[in-house]
Image (cartoon, rainbow, N blue to C red):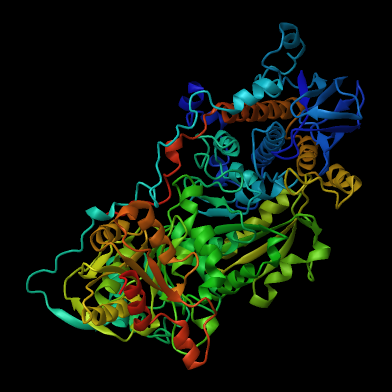
């Protein structure tokens, strides 16, 4: 148990390489080379394996409360955040584990927050839905559907106020897209030309209600039209398409032209949360997506077809990812619960007198 | 080799029925494949493989009821080496295929698991952190707080509350580039109540921002900007409209420091007129003091006079926490003395004894302080000397000052403009009863708005609100006069 404590934050090997590659370097933004593709593969696989393990720990009773898995949607966080620059911000709702990993947060800290332990990114006080890392530019992790949209727009307001050239990537789902506060934010974002990219992850279901049953306009990229915000539909299962769209949107926002909407068409394989048996859709529907549109399988095929990686190389990535996830799970299981003395900390900051 | 365990569908599930197997022994499975269905009285759920490999053995046949959570239901062999910690050396030999994958404790027996779930070292130490109403250590004890001395020779300048608030904002905006004001009509219109008069001219539209009529949205933007490290002042035209934004005030501003384990600071001031104006009826006349004072993570200030309005607003803007600053429309035009000093900043969390007396303690905040003082004058004529405490800050509440006074007067009447049930007075009475029960010579009383929405008709409106007369009556009752 003591080992878990001392090992905290020193295990850099466990960190995904997301940060290092965030400055896209040689191939201009949006363009992808072999190294990018291999990194996407690794980062998506890390999220998938991490989430599978989270589901397993939930089943074992080690993770409590609500736990929303990102499985199926990995290409979005990985693709969008591959163009994130140092100082850009990321904010999302409660299906947030994938975004944190894609921000470069330590899987150990994320998993330990899921188990409610002292080494979690919020010291065990936030849980699955409320995680943050100022270091990684990750502003949560918000539990109220749509709440992150004005907050993300406010991050963008701060960027404009400071004239720092940074962009706030603000994610929300097809469910949140029907919240009034989203449109209040759209209005101000365009009115004041705020540098924000709205990434709508349309996974087709707002909890158990399909987009057709909840939305009069199901093409969510059009939802900014009455505010004059440009929008685009993107295949959210294709990490390269996601990256290219994100690069274009971010360039638009960064150059001072204001917000941009990307509707990522995607699919979540699991239920809304762990306690959702997902009876509102058929197993065949899920299987069909997994078989024909899986973002990781697709990229794997491309890597092999284009000769970027052979079976052995991919297996080595698989093994590395498994090791990271296994280590994170073990860390999260053995990290101690927060001490009782933490109950009353972090309620207020002391004012400088 | 990995054991597949009976999963829990929810944190409360203890057992369930293994309804169906989708695989048989010898089948190859990949991560994510559905291998079984389980049922409880509430739901049915599919069990997916979390690893690839061959189903070596099915340990619990389909149709078995009352399978305890974490019981091994199948054994997965081969694939990658997700090995059990308690495995035999023979198991290890079989799983040597991809040695790069570290042994990971996936599936320990249920009994072990429950132990692993509880940390060995730190069983919660009970009562180590004792709640004292507002427990957080970062809240400075009120007894250590003091108003600054007014420097000798400093002029006292007659100032309206409106201008005192304006001066506070202007001074803080000059002092800190990160401070800005946003809200409806704050810039070109110069403030719906002229509180932000001339700020646009001095600071420009980057720092004095007119928003659309969209409280939920702009409150959220303000909180987001605060999370990014700026110091927004979010003006609500009245706090009635902040009801549309209360989600961001509470869920986003008040809770995020805690939820982030201390990482995300949210230094923002939400301010505007609160309470009853004149003849504007129910939707425009409500006192939200107790609503916000209920919430840990917020500080709540409700000043009465101009000097307090200025000194406390400056403190609120500098405070690193989210602050709800409740003003009063009926006080905006009233003039009070404000000391002319370079930097008039008052401590948050300190009540002020506005009149000393030994017969009864009157507590009040915001406009009610004026009524309490008037009642005290009237009572003095009848031989009852009231001590009037201006609460000034509602969270953290300076209950030390209240308790000290009650221990002297042995009687308490609280006055507030809001409704009585679950209100500020209810909290004060509860604390006095908890901490000074033996000093009380009479049951405490509360004066508050009648328990109805604010009426429009002039006579009913007057009947509904606290009045000097009602306060005098309550004091006589606790004084048995």
In terms of depth relative to the viewer, which is nearer, B372 or A41?
B372
How far across and how far down the image is residue A152, in percent? 55, 60
Q: Residue at x 51, y 42 (%)?
A: A122
Is residue B228 rendered to the left or right of residue A202?
left
Identify the image quadrant of residue B441: bottom left
Quadrant in which the N terminus of chain B is drawn: top right
In terms of depth relative to the viewer, which is nearer, B203 or B104?
B104
- Toward the top, the furthest residue is B89
Q: Is residue A353 visible?
A: no
How far across and how far down the image is residue B203, in percent? 34, 76
Is residue B222 rendered to the left or right of residue B18?
left
Q: How many numbered badges does the structure rendering display?
A: 0
Identify the image quadrant of residue B350: bottom left
As drawn, A130 above or below A42: below
Q: Residue at x 78, y 25 (%)?
A: B4
Q: Is residue B342 visible?
A: yes
In terms of depth relative to the viewer, which is nearer, B16 or A182?
B16
As drawn, B208 above or below B130: below
Identify the image quadrant of residue B12: top right
How far across and how far down the image is residue A50, in percent? 67, 35
- Toward the bottom, the furthest residue is B458
As drawn, A85 above or below B83: below
How far across and how far down the image is residue B165, in percent? 31, 76
């Amino acid at each position: 148990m003591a080992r878990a404590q001392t090992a905290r934050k020193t295990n850099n090997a466990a960190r995904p390489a997301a940060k290092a590659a965030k400055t896209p370097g040689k191939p201009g933004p949006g363009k992808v080379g072999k190294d990018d593709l291999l990194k996407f593969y690794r980062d998506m696989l890390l999220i998938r394996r991490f989430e599978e393990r989270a589901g397993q720990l939930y089943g074992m009773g080690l993770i409590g409360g609500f736990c929303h898995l990102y499985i199926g949607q990995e290409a979005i966080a990985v693709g969008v955040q591959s163009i994130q620059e140092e100082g850009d911000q990321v904010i999302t709702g409660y299906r947030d584990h994938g975004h944190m990993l894609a921000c470069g947060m330590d899987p150990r800290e994320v998993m330990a927050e899921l188990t409610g332990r002292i080494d979690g990114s919020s010291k065990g006080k936030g849980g699955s839905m409320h995680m943050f890392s100022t270091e990684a530019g990750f502003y949560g992790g918000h539990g109220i559907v749509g709440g992150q949209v004005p907050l993300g727009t406010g991050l963008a307001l701060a960027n404009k106020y400071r004239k720092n050239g940074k962009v706030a990537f603000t994610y929300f789902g097809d469910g949140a897209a029907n919240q009034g506060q989203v449109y209040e934010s759209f209005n101000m974002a365009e009115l004041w030309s705020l540098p924000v990219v709205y990434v709508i992850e349309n996974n087709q279901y707002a909890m158990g209600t399909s987009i057709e049953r909840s939305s009069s306009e199901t093409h969510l990229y059009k939802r900014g039209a009455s505010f004059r915000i440009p929008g685009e539909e993107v295949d959210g299962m294709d990490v390269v398409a996601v990256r290219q769209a994100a690069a274009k949107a971010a360039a638009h926002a960064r150059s001072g032209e204001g917000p941009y909407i990307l509707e990522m068409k995607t699919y979540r394989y699991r239920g809304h949360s762990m306690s959702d048996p997902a009876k509102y859709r058929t197993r065949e529907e899920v299987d069909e997506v997994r078989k024909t549109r899986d973002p990781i399988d697709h990229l794997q095929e491309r890597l092999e077809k284009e000769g970027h990686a052979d079976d052995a190389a991919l297996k080595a990535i698989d093994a590395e990812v498994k090791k990271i996830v296994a280590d994170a799970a073990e860390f999260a299981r053995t990290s101690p619960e927060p001490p009782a003395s933490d109950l009353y900390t972090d309620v207020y900051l002391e004012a400088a007198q | 080799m990995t054991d597949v365990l009976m999963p829990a569908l929810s944190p409360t599930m203890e057992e369930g029925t293994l309804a169906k197997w989708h695989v048989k022994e010898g089948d190859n499975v990949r991560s994510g494949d559905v291998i079984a269905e389980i049922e409880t009285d509430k739901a049915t759920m599919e069990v997916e493989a979390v690893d690839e490999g061959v189903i070596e053995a099915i340990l619990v046949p389909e149709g078995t009821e009352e399978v305890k959570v974490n019981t091994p239901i199948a054994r997965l062999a081969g694939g990658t080496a997700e090995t059990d910690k308690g495995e035999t050396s023979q198991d290890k030999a079989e799983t040597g295929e991809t040695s790069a994958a570290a042994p990971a404790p996936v599936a320990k027996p249920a009994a072990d698991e429950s132990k692993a779930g509880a940390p060995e070292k730190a069983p919660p130490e009970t009562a180590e952190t004792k709640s004292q109403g507002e427990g957080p250590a970062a809240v400075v004890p009120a007894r250590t707080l003091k108003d600054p001395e007014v420097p000798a020779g400093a002029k006292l300048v007659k100032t309206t509350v409106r201008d005192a608030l304006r001066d506070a904002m202007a001074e803080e905006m000059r002092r800190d580039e990160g401070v800005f004001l946003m809200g409806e009509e704050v810039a070109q219109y110069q403030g719906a109540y002229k509180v932000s008069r001339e700020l646009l001219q001095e600071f420009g539209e980057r720092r004095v921002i007119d928003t659309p009529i969209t409280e939920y949205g702009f409150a959220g933007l303000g909180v987001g900007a605060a999370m990014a490290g700026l110091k927004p002042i979010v003006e609500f035209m009245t706090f009635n409209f902040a009801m549309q934004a209360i989600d961001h005030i509470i869920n986003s501003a008040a809770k995020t420091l805690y939820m982030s384990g201390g990482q995300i600071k949210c230094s923002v001031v939400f301010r505007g007129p609160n309470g009853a104006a004149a003849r504007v009826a129910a939707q425009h006349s409500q006192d939200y003091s107790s609503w916000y004072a209920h919430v840990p993570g917020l500080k709540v200030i409700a000043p009465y006079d101009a000097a307090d309005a200025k000194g406390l607003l400056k403190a609120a803007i500098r405070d690193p926490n989210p602050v709800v600053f409740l003003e009063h429309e009926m006080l905006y035009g009233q003039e009070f003395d404000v000391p002319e000093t370079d930097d008039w900043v008052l401590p948050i969390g300190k009540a002020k004894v506005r009149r000393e007396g030994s017969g009864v303690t009157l507590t009040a905040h915001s406009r009610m302080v004026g009524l309490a003082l008037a009642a005290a004058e009237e009572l003095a004529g009848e031989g009852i000397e009231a001590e009037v405490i201006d609460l000034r800050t509602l969270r953290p509440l300076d209950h030390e000052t209240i308790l000290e006074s009650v221990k002297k007067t042995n009687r308490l009447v609280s006055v507030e403009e809001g409704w009585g049930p679950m209100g500020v007075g209810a909290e004060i009475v509860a604390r006095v009863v908890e901490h000074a029960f033996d000093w009380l010579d009479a049951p405490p009383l509360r004066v508050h708005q009648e328990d109805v929405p604010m009426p429009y008709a002039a006579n009913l409106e007057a009947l509904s609100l606290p009045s000097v007369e009602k306060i005098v009556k309550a004091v006589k009752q606790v004084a048995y006069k």
